[in-house]
Image: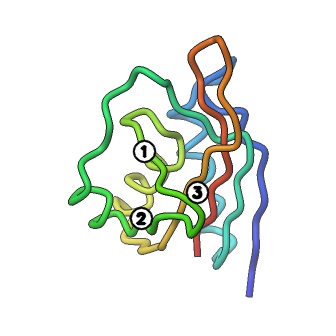
Amino acid sequence: MRMLTLNCHSLLNYDSERQIQEIVDQIVREEIDVLSLQEVNQSQLADAVAEDELESLGYKEPAEESAVIKSDNFACRLSRALKKVKLDFKWSWNQAYREADGLEWGVALFS
């Protein structure tokens, strides 16, 4: 089993589209089975992703509480990119905290 852990610090100071593509390339190249991401964020004011799209992307709600996945959620965007290269991961995102700057931060697991 091959695992990859990353601190994304997504949506801040990075070209997140390029960052997503680099992660996808690494997953393909290294044949990663499990991916753990921290500092995965989303905007508090972005639109929520529809439940049927989340289901098609392999999203599973966290056990403790229901998370609202927004359209700019880094893990959701990564999941879309993985689907494009025919990788079918199950994944989950859970919010850790909110900041006054309008971002929600959390962790994501892909398997």
Residue 90 percent location from the top left of the image: 48, 73
Residue found 39% across the figure and 64% down from its top: 85
Question: Residues under labels 3 and 1: Cα distance?
Answer: 24 Å
Colour setup of the view: rainbow
Disc 3 and disc 1 in contact, CB within 8 angstroms: no
Residue 99 percent location from the top left of the image: 68, 20
Looking at the rendering, which quadrant does residue 100 occupy?
top right
- Give the residue type at disc 1: Ile
Query: Is label 3 in a helix, a strand or a loop?
Result: helix
- Give the residue type at disc 2: Tyr
How crowded pointer 1 is (Cα within 10 Å; few <14, some 14-19, many 20+) is rated as many
Left or right placement of residue 99 versus residue 49 in this view: right
Query: Is label 2 in a helix, a strand or a loop?
Result: loop
Name the image quarter holding the N terminus: bottom right
Residue at the spot of label 1:
69
Residue 55: assigned label: none
Name the image quarter holding the C terminus: bottom right
Residue at the spot of label 3:
25
Left or right placement of residue 61 versus residue 13 in this view: left
Mark nearer the N terminus (3 vs 1): 3
Which one is nearer the viewer's eye here, 100 or 40?
100
Question: Residues under labels 2 and 1: Cα distance?
Answer: 10 Å
Disc 2 and disc 1 in contact, CB within 8 angstroms: yes
Residue at the spot of label 2:
59
- Give the residue type at disc 3: Asp
